[in-house]
Amino acid sequence: MDDVSYRELFRPIIRKVMEDYQSNSVVLQCGADSLSADKLGDFNMSVKGHADCLQFLRSYNFPLIVLDGGEYTIGNVARCWCYDIVVSVGIEPDNNLPENEFIEFFWPRLPASYCAH
């Protein structure tokens, strides 16, 4: 399951849920198990594809509580949660990170297609 395949499933399902339930707020649990290289999952999503779901829900302009979770590869978790946080507040992230003691958790060790560029 890649970014495009997941998007093609996620958007129509969520659109229907939002129409039927007419919610005025949403709590979204954004498990990162769907990311490429997850030790237990078989999905092949990028951080950017993962955040696309969050951006879609934000488009409804409802109060949104975002809970991250899941994933067993620490670098994936760091990248995903960081990206989700900036997307959830409507900021386009800058990939130019300053030097810091945790930098190794943010630079991908995976193919470039996985990165949130």
Image (spheres, rainbow, N blue to C red):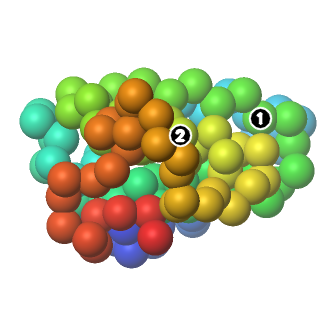
Residue 82 badge: 2
The answer to which of 86 and 101 lies nearer the viewer is 101
Q: Identify the image quadrant of residue 56.
A: bottom right
In-image side of 95 versus 103 (left or right): right
Q: Which residue is mark 1?
A: 64
The spot of residue 58 in percent (x, y) is 76, 52
Question: Regarding mark 1 in the picture, which secondary structure is present there?
Answer: strand
The answer to which of 114 and 103 lies nearer the viewer is 103
The spot of residue 41 in percent (x, y) is 16, 41
- Real-space Cα separation, disc 1 to disc 2, in angstroms: 17 Å
Residue at image position (38%, 39%) is 103
Question: For the view shown, which residue lies furthest in the front direction?
Answer: 99
Assess disc 2: are there few (<14), some (14-19) or many (≥20) residues with their C-alpha within 10 Å of its C-alpha: some
Can residue 22 be seen at all in this image of the molecule? yes
The spot of residue 63 in percent (x, y) is 86, 35
Q: Quadrant of the N terminus?
A: bottom left
The spot of residue 97 in percent (x, y) is 52, 51
Q: Amino acid at mark 1?
A: Leu
Residue at image position (19%, 67%) is 111
Residue at image position (39%, 74%) is 4
Can residue 10 be seen at all in this image of the molecule? no
Question: Regarding mark 2 in the picture, which secondary structure is present there?
Answer: helix
The answer to which of 79 and 46 lies nearer the viewer is 79
Above or below, comparing residue 6 to residue 90 in the picture: below
Q: Amino acid at mark 2?
A: Cys
In-image side of 43 versus 34 (left or right): left
